[in-house]
Image: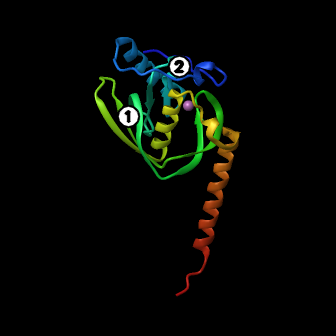
Amino acid sequence: MALRSIRKVGDPVLTKHSKEVRKMTPRLEELIDDMLDTMYEAGGVGLAAPQVGILKRIVVVDVSPEQDDPFILVDPQIIETSGEQTGYEGCLSLPGKSGVVKRPEYVKVSAFDRNMKEVEYEGQDLLARAFCHEIDHLDGKMYTEMMEGDLIDNSELAEMQEQAEREAQEAQDNQEEEPRTI
Ligand code: NI
């Protein structure tokens, strides 16, 4: 296992279509292990092979709080979507930035695992978002292409979220202070 360097926006590899894997090899297994290490080290919830310069249809995703429950998807395809979610999204290839992207609320993905066994995974919320985001990388697409509005700095986003939390807390406090009437 080893860390690989993450390609950043502007690197042409991020705009290219990745090729189907079809057959697992020791070299690709090593790539998967390295992608997991690299994702965890960078603090991301997903990573696609082209982000480490390899144009193969492989992605890893882990949205678990302990970052110990990864999905490994080889030749993934989104086979079902429903609903809609709009929220901020970031990418390890564009560090420190976020933008608003509309994604399905639910997706079902078919893929192969690292043993090339056929699998199906369902995701909602962040997991659905991560599946879509990573699979887009395999087609050379960055979230910035479908973003609503402008990129913002993550520090600015953190401030906005803190402000929203303060306001929500204040609203709750005010409500609690109101005398109860029957
Ligand atoms: Ni990304």
- Residue at point 49%, 26% (across, down): 48
Q: Quadrant of ligand 1?
A: top right
Which residue corresponds to mark 1?
A: 69
The residue sitting at 49% across, 44% down in the picture is 126
Residue 153, how many percent across, how many down? 70, 38
In the image, what residue occupies the spot 52% across and 36% down?
133
> Is 33 positioned to the left or the right of 181 in the image?
left
**Left-right relation of 5 to 147:** left
Number of marks drawn: 2
Q: Work out which residue is located at the far bottom of the displayed protein and give it.
A: 182
Ligand 1: does it lie within 8 Å of the C-beta at label 1? no
Q: Is residue 139 above or below residue 108?
A: above
Please tell me which residue lies in front, 155 or 110: 110
| Label of residue 51 in the image | none
* Quadrant position of residue 116: top left
Depth check: give the residue in front, 56 or 67: 56
Circle 2 SS class? helix
Badge 2: residue crowd in 10 Å (few <14, some 14–19, many ≥20): many
Q: Quadrant of the N terminus?
A: top left
Which quadrant holds residue 66?
top left
Residue shown at the point (68%, 46%) measured from the top left: 159
151 and 138: which one is in front?
Answer: 138
